[in-house]
Amino acid sequence: MLAAPLRGRLALAACLAAAALLPAAARAADYPARDVRIIVPFPAGGTADIAARVVAAELGKAWGKAVVVDNKAGAGGNVGTAEAARATPDGYTLLMGTVSTHAINQSVYAKLPYDPVKDFTPVTLVIPVPNVLELNPAFADKHGIRSVADLIKYLKANPGSVNMASTGNGTSTHLSGELFQTMTGTRMTHVPYKGSSPALTDVMAGSADLIFDNLPSSMGFIKGGKLRPLAVTTATRSPALPDVPTLAEAGVQGYEASSWFGLLAPAGTPQQIVDKVQRDVAAALRQAPVREQLQAQGATPSGNTPAQFTQFMARETVKWAAVVKQSGAKVD
């Protein structure tokens, strides 16, 4: 039989342990009790921002709380992602992560200010999207470029003379272009920007000649005739641009690349909160108006489970590491 003092100490320890669990459980049951912030590590107007604002609007309706999108751009998404990694893991700060921040940057950058695996808890994939190779129309007309074959011919005759914009070093728009150059034996001058909006502005203005941009952020400009699409980067055509061939169809055999955007929480966020956010995002993405809105921009709504998203990111990390190695793209 235990001595009375020892029994007392054990009882006290058990009570303290139970008490320590109560706040987390209570927070999860009451979540969200206040406004929630979604950090977007790129400027407003890009696909990450579009995805975050669609999700924020629907979650705000479901929760009766404001869900605020906070754009924190810089360093290929590293600035905002690092801020999210340092946030309190209570569900009130989420991150709209991307293929860049959670599958590419660790292979491109010599050192990251966050660990894409250890510092985050995956919540759900929101949308995968194609990239689209698109040109400034005046540049295309001046040089008679109407197809991917025309572009490759011009690039081989004028190595390094074409400015290829991207949404930042290490982003999928950058790596899509690097992969294209590797597979076609061509060379362009890479011009990185801090997101889609400034990059697209310069392509349309003629300061840069072309870009491999995410389709949702470019769709309006394509429809308006301000950008000329030559091909999409995915294995199959996009339903949103059915007349635009894939790069493989256009002659770059074996080419395939895409972008994606998904929600993550800081590591240590209670699982009950992670599961609630995933369920509510998935429910929002199943709504017909939301699906139609995203599909019209070339995105495919997902809403998969945290486990599925974790496995997906692991596969993407391996895939893009091979692309980075093949292209030789690196950032100090």
Image (spheres, helix red, strand yellow):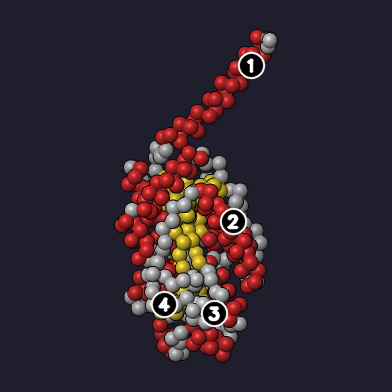
Q: Quadrant of the N terminus?
A: top right
Of the pair 324 and 208, the residue shown nearer to us? 324
Secondary structure under tag 2 reads helix
- Mark 4 nearby-residue class (10 Å; few <14, some 14–19, many ≥20): some
Q: CA distance from mark 1 to mark 2?
A: 45 Å
Q: CA distance from mark 4 to mark 3?
A: 14 Å
Three-letter residue code for mark 4: Val
- Upstream in the sequence, badge 4 or badge 2? 4
Residue 267 place in picture, x, y as percent: 56, 45
Q: Name the residue carrying label 4.
A: 244
Secondary structure under tag 4 reads loop
- Upstream in the sequence, badge 4 or badge 3? 4
Residue 217 place in picture, x, y as percent: 41, 67
Q: Quadrant of the C terminus?
A: bottom right
Residue 21 place in picture, x, y as percent: 53, 29
Q: Name the residue carrying label 2.
A: 314
Q: Which numbered disc, 1 or 2, marks the residue closer to the eye?
A: 2
Q: CA distance from mark 4 to mark 1?
A: 72 Å
Three-letter residue code for mark 1: Arg
Number of marks present in the image shown = 4
**Residue under the image location 59 percent in, 78 percent down:** 183
Residue 24 sits above or below residue 138 on the image: above
- Mark 2 nearby-residue class (10 Å; few <14, some 14–19, many ≥20): some
Q: Name the residue carrying label 1.
A: 9
- Is residue 176 in sight in this rendering? yes
Of the pair 63 and 44, the residue shown nearer to us? 63
Three-letter residue code for mark 3: Val
Q: Name the residue carrying label 3.
A: 252
Q: For the residues labelled 1 and 2, say whether their Cβ atoms are less than 8 Å apart.
A: no
